[in-house]
Image (cartoon, rainbow, N blue to C red):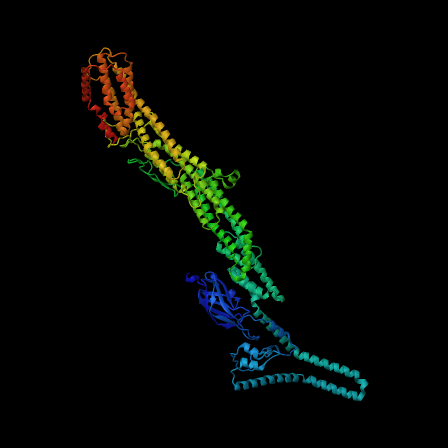
Amino acid sequence: MSRARQPPLVTGISPNEGIAWTKVTIRGENLGTGPTDLLGLTICGHNCLLTAEWMSASKIVCRVGQAKNDKGDIIVTTKSGGKGTSTVSFKLLKPEKIGILDQSAVWVDEMNYYDMRTDRNKGIPPLSLRPANPLGIEIDKGRFPQKDLELLFPGMSADFTSENFSAAWYLIENHSTTSFDQLKTAVVNLKKQANKKNEGSLAYVKGGLSTFFEAQDALSAIHQKLEADGTEKVEGSMTQKLENVLNRASNTADTLFQEVLGRKDKADSTRNALNVLQRFKFLFNLPLNIERNIQKGDYDVVINDYEKAKSLFGKTEVQVFKKYYAEVETRIEALRELLLDKLLETPSTLHDQKRYIRYLSDLHAPGDPAWQCIGAQHQWILQLMHNCKESYVKEHKGSALLHSPMLDLDSDVRPSPIGHLSQTASLKRGSSFQSGRDDAWRYKAPQQVVFVEKLTKLVVSQLPNFWKLWVSYVNGSLFSETAEKSGQMERSKKNARQRQNDFKKMIQEVMHSLVKLIRGALLPFSLREGELRQYGGWEMKSELSGQWLTHVIQTVRLSSESLTALEIPNDMLQIIQDLILDLRVRCIIVTLQHTAEDIKRLAEKEDWVVDNEGLTSLPSQFEQCIIRSLQSLKTVLDCKPGEASVFQQQKTQEDVCQLSIGIMQGFIDCLEQLSTKPDGDIDTSHLSVDVSSPDLFGSIHEESSLSSEQRLLIALSNCRYLERHTFLNIAEHFEKHGFQGVDKITQVSMESLKELDQRLFEMYIEFKADPIVGSLEPGIYAGYFDWKDCLIPTGVRNYLKEALVNIIAVHAEVFTISKDLVPRVMSRVVEAVSEELSRLMQCVSSFSKNGALQAKLEICALRDTVAIYLTPESKSSFKQALEALPQLSSGTDRKLLEELLNKFKSSMHLQLTCFQASSSAMMKT
């Protein structure tokens, strides 16, 4: 553990003893990282945190409270280190009695003082009640312990105003080191003070001498009158005279001392009032101080002053104090209302919210401010979310009137999540194909996407503080600053347990609003009609593309991760996972739909430039288009922690499978459309042939138009490549990205491709074989030829040579486009020719000897020439044709046949080179 987290250790305190409210300096180690880190401070068991002033990690200044224990440890408690220990202790002394003229730095209980001031029966002048130094010499306090003196003089006191005054105790406590001479001086001082009192009494008598003399004269006159007139006559007169004398004495005394006594009483009253004002100025100034501190925002000072005033004057019976304390309560009530308004004010930081809650708690505000704050924050977050939606909906509708749909893009251009897109060039395998758009385009993000980003950012920024406020409310940390508030913390925890379901509903309401607002913007079809009116309102002229949906999914995923990091229970966040799953499914569907549209438009990009393998760029463009589409879905298909597979639902599997099949079928339809277009619809001004391709019989000129037969051959070559490579590669990519039903997609696509291939092949064979087959019969019977009456054969006739030349032309055309198609095409052409030749031979009723020899020569010449392209069907046809001829019986005929065949092969050696085995081997390589 680091040093900052070690428990506090108190190693010194200065002073180490004193009375209550003595200011002390505490030193030690790990005493906290700041004022807010200090949780508790006790000295001799009394909590001194209220007066504590944190200076540094090794120094704290505070005042000692009125503890019950005389001696105890100094314990410091911090957030970072917990409860600490102490190696020193503090001794609490009993307070000394302070005279009315003595200065004091601490609060003094003045009740006894006032009791003594009002006790005038003792006849002691008020200013002499507690003389500071009755002996008149320097006081030297001794070091004798107070407890020892109490044991030495039980029941006595060193206070000379006390009835149990002990002179010995007073001298030991105040003059233990005073010299004898100084004590003599003290005796003289005491005698002087006594003489002053006697002189004061004598002066008082001197002031009333005239009254006494008048009284004496009156008494003498009464005495003489009694002797002269007798007792009875003067009794009434004497009584009257005595009353007059007494009245005159009283009036004289009143006249002499009324003014002096009045001034003295007024001075005493003034002095008394000034003392009260001085000693209780804290209470009298408190209302004004509260106002000033509230204006400055020093709420901590206000709370501390209020706590002090409440402890001192909360239960007072003095009317003046009651009046001022009532004024204090009035201002504190206003402060409670002010703090509650600030607490419920939005927006507000979590720090301020906790601070205001603590203030209201310390001021004993009614109700539950923390729960009120949680409710206000909940409503504010919901209001922010709906305001965000309304503002973007208005902006979206306004922009829709001024601009065209934001997503009306070309098929080969899609906006990326960051708003940039560049069209990839050279998609064709090994060719110089360039897209018509290579420039980078910047697109403004759709309003729905910006709204989702703003909405999730709003929730992610506000919900953490909302959640942390609830956590603080649950664990009681809002009120557990000091140990004295443990009861309040328990009440908070109890309230939190009772309101746990209510808070859960608040979180769920926020999550539901977030999800439904996003659904209203992106998946309106997933909301009910009533929900759509509340959470929708968007004008969906065009649906978002897959790239924008991918960006939205990433945004929602990041928001979900941020909320999960707050340790919010998963059941509250499950609705977000359901939203992500629906967005992922929708993104896949939309992406595949857009891919299908792009595939349909590939026909417009066919340039008919053939490479040395007989392929155009179309298969490569098709494969690249699907690969790009799947790559754009990679992040969507990948499952993040807590997410389910996008293919877990059977309906999703079926929809994706059908869309994938539709994409493949769309490209097959594209091929068929290109290969079957009328000649006038094809622009072949840019047509060229790869120079690396061996062109035995010339090539298609750049300026010539592309014939239907050539387009069919190119389409057949592309189909062959698709079947053997492209479709298999695409199937691998589907499996790599986790698609379901790949076998079905491949099977259906292959069947459809083979059907197209067969149709195109039959069309080409029909174009090429039918003219050759149709020319055989007219050629055979040209010049009124008759098998029954013919001359001795001199060689192969021209009709067969023409047929071979036409077959060679087909070979050259196919070889120019694709060498790999030559065997397939030539075999079918040879089958057609052999079948027709067999039919013609079987239709002949009879052959002459020369006719049979001529027929066998031509059949054998054709068979031997196309031997490498013979199939079982063509071999059977040639066999049937030969069987229809009479057998050659003589060796002369057979020899002639062989010579004529060799002559034919020799004369047409150059033309027949394409039918040689070496050519076939070269083709296959």
Tell me if I can see residue 894 in this picture: yes
Seen at 57% across and 70% down, the residue is: 279
| Image spot of residue 601 (x, y percent) | 37, 32
Q: Can residue 700 be seen in this view?
A: no
What residue occupies the far top of the structure in this picture? 789
Locate the C terminus and report the quarter of the image it occupies. top left
Report x, y in % for residue 534: 52, 41
Residue 22, compared with residue 715, is above or below; it is below
Residues 586 and 766: in front is 766
Front-most of residues 376 and 41: 41
| Number of residue marks | 0
Place residue 27 in its image quadrant: bottom left
Reply above or below: 829 against 791.
below
With 113 as the anchor, is 553 left or right in this view? left
Q: Where is residue 619 in the image (x, y as percent from the top left)?
A: 33, 33
Location of residue 275 in the rendering, given as x and y in whole percent from the top left corner: 58, 72
Residue 475 appears left or right of 117: left
Task: Give the position of the N terminus as an image quadrant.
Answer: bottom left
- Please tell me which residue lies in front, 342 or 616: 616
